[in-house]
Image (spheres, helix red, strand yellow):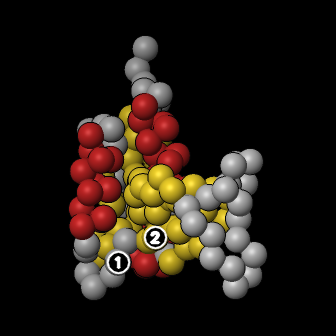
Amino acid sequence: MSSKKILVLGSVNADHLVRVPRLPKPGETVAGKDYEVIPGGKGANQAVACARLGGQTAFIACVGDDAFGTEMIQRFKADGIDTQAVCQVADQMTGVALICVDNQAENCIVIAPGANAKLRTSRVQAQHGLSYP
């Protein structure tokens, strides 16, 4: 039985996650702990899940020409994702999400889309006929 071919189109973010005892109120500062930077973005999460479940996965996305973008592409490749349509956009930062998660698993998220905002129709159309490995 051959694995399914899956094409994912979506966002890529460097998620900056900090755990807090409770979410801050407007204007308030709350001390956090367990800060980490992890790969994220709705599209990236879907592509990784598909690949880890055995699908032949290709991903169309934009990342920045920064260290986060380079690392994300390397991680996608390590998960077996075809990254030929992941564009590293010059003079753009990779998207960033700032995430606070409280003790009840509620969260508060702010994003700066960065290169995600450069994923336009023309970039997607340029991938017509994308071949899988």
At horizontal 33% and vertical 61% (from top left) the residue drawn is: 86
Could you tell me how far apart the alpha carbons at marks 2 and 1 are, in whole angstroms? 8 Å
x, y (%) of residue 44?
46, 53
Report if the CB atoms under discs 2 and 1 are less than 8 Å apart: yes
> Quadrant of residue 91 in the image?
bottom left
Disc 1 marks which amino acid? Met
At horizontal 74% and vertical 48% (from top left) the residue drawn is: 104
Q: Residue furthest front?
A: 31
Q: Quadrant of the N terminus?
A: top left
Residue 30 in view (yes/no): yes
Q: SS class of the residue under badge 2?
A: strand
Residue 45 lies, with reference to residue 118, above or below; the image says above
Disc 2 marks which amino acid? Val
> Where does label 1 land, which residue?
93
Residue 95 lies, with reference to residue 38, above or below; the image says below
Q: SS class of the residue under badge 1?
A: loop
> Where does label 2 land, which residue?
96
